[in-house]
Image: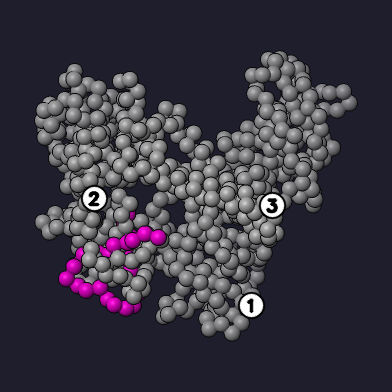
Amino acid sequence: MSIHTAPDQSKEDTQEFMTVKIDDQLFGIAVYYVQDVLASQKITSIPLAPEQVIGSINLRGRIVMMVDLRTCLKLSSLPDRECRKSIVVERKGDLYSLLVDAVGDVLTLPLAELTDDPNNMPPAWHQISDGVFMLEGQILIILDIEKLFEVMLQPLAVGDPRQLKL
Amino acid sequence: MDDLISEFLAEESKEGGDPSQAVHVNIDVLENLIKTVSELVVTRNRLLQLSRITANTEFTSPLQRLNYLTSELEEQVVKSKMQPISSAWLPVLIVETENQRFAIPQADILEIVRTGNNAEDIIEEMNGQPLLRLRGELLPLISLAHALKLQAGPLSKERHFIVICEIGCFHYGIIVDRVFDTEEIVVKPVSTLLQHIDFYSGTTILGDGSIIMILDVYGFAKATGELSPKSLATSVTVQSDKEEADPLARFLVFSTASGSPKVVPLELVMRLEEIDANIIEYTVSGPVIQYRGELMFLTQLDEAILLPKEGIIQLIVFIDHEKILGLVVDEILDIVEHSIRVTSTSSKDGFFGNIVIEGKTCDLVDIGYYFKQTFPDIREAISFAQQQSLPHLLFVDDSPFFRKFIPPALMVAGYYVTVAENAQEALKMLYCNKTAFAAVITDMNMPGMSGAEFAKCYKSDKDLACLPVIALTSQSSEQIDAYVDNHFLDAYVSKTNHDELLKTIATILSSRTEAVA
């Protein structure tokens, strides 16, 4: 499955979101970020990588960093990482694949219904959230991909010399 | 960035091709083309590997055709000068530790030593730090498994391989479990998420489709603790672009059979080699060796001394106009960062003059002279046959060093260069023929009239007002931003940054051509 939709193609007042499940919570990612949805992959681990980075995969000759959204959301990671689905997003020319528990439908939602995060949302979630939709029976948290990468790259940019002790 | 246009000859293979056949291609298109070719090569390798396992299927014949076409395409891409723009084919050694594979660039490897289990060499320890005695030298070692935190605790006494790496004149060893083949790979940049890790210089996909990290030998050298941050900074030559304002240059210091130490700008050096004297062949045009499928001509600073007939010979390898020149030296001594102040100029051919480095007077070698001596046809080919059609640049600098250092690089890049020693001389040349030059490159700080005054002066002439000027400087970029705003400068580049200078010239010339058209 592969979805390519430019942001200006959707009507101004609605937007399409790919829904994913993480720890029974529904999250949404704007579809124009989504390049691909992958089933289980052979992951090559990378020593010393940040904890969110599980490793890299070879996606048709391109190297893609596999990022565990559970770790980003400060949830405990699951052992069956190689068997789960992931969403490929592109940012500044690099490809990343975000590992999720399950992939749901694509929903077209009116942006006017997007509301602010509730006050008691965990800080790690609030940092990367763009707001929530109150759907029937459940709440959809919209993930802001830009914020997600900002949060991931911030501690690395400070210059972590990782002085090595043997 | 989109207006950054690169000019290249579509088919280099047509020797002496007409320069008017040059085409303009957006650099993004080139980048994509190269990326696609690299991926095609990788896929081809993978298919070949699979086909070796299952012999003689109906795929064999089309595969051979694919193999042939891919090789040809690869060769064409390498031949046209597009290749260095984004990715590079790099020979690497594949090693393994804790069942994980990594690649080490071949160019950084001196040799491989086996230890443990009845092997001659053993790993010793001093205060928990591993060491290896090798031919009288005590080498610091670093365990790949420990450095990458794949293993903790003491080093096992089992069999190991030690990859001896070299940075300048500093040697050390990386301990690995196994050593596999060498492979030619296409280097891909490390993801932003991993750029803070010192130990990786790139990543790649191998022929079998697996992903592998390329190790950064500088990072490991730093981790051995043997290199002081200062000496390491001078060894790492290509890493940082942020040093544009740095007025220093890096020099390779070496010794020859006689006289004081010699130095050559590191930027000109392609690589260092050790060869066995018995592979030297003596042709009528001089001693040569067969080097990576081409001929490398050998030269010495003192021709009176005969080359040794046996033993190991140290070479500094230079490449210019696709000619390979190996300078025979006694010993590589050091890499130093030093100001480019030539203390005295030399009248002897082949030398610029003297530089005092750490209290010792060194001779600064003019490698261009030795190229001319060895390949007499190089300069003539440029200056007569093609000079009419090449873009003509005026280069103004009061420093004799830079007058000898920069124009050759511009000529190699396909420009015809006229040199002036000061602003007055340059003005005379400009007024003499107002349409002769395509661009002016000037030093900023010159006695008498400064570069900025010079630019203002000639641009007040309406015929010369459109002639672009690129300022060379050793000042910080903030200071220069002010210059570009207030004065008549079109661009500025650090004196020691050749690549940036070439890029800037190309950009300015192509935007000018567009404006005229």
For marks 3 and 2, the one nearer the N-term is: 3
Tag 1 subunit: B
Of tags 3 and 2, the one toward the viewer is: 3
Quadrant into which the N terminus of chain B falls: top left
Residue plotted at (64% across, 75% down): B156
Q: Pinpoint the chain carrying mark 2.
A: B
Which residue type carries mark 3? Glu
- Of labels 2 and 1, earlier in sequence is 1
Please, is residue A5 above or below residue B506 in the view? above
Please tell me whether mark 2 or mark 1 is closer to you in this view.
2
Q: CA distance from mark 3 to mark 2?
A: 51 Å
User: Of residues B375 and A22, which is closer to you in this image?
Assistant: B375
Q: Is residue B344 above or below residue B455?
A: below
Amino acid on which disc 1 is placed: Glu
The Cα–Cα distance between marks 2 and 1, rounded to whole angstroms, is 55 Å
Q: Could you say which is closer to the camera, residue A137 or residue B513? A: B513
Please identify the quarter of the rendering in which residue A60 is found. Answer: top right
**On the image, numbered disc 2 is attached to which residue?**
B378
- Determine whether, in the image, residue B39 is placed left or right of residue B170: right
Which residue is the site of mark 1?
B158
> Residue under circle 3?
B58
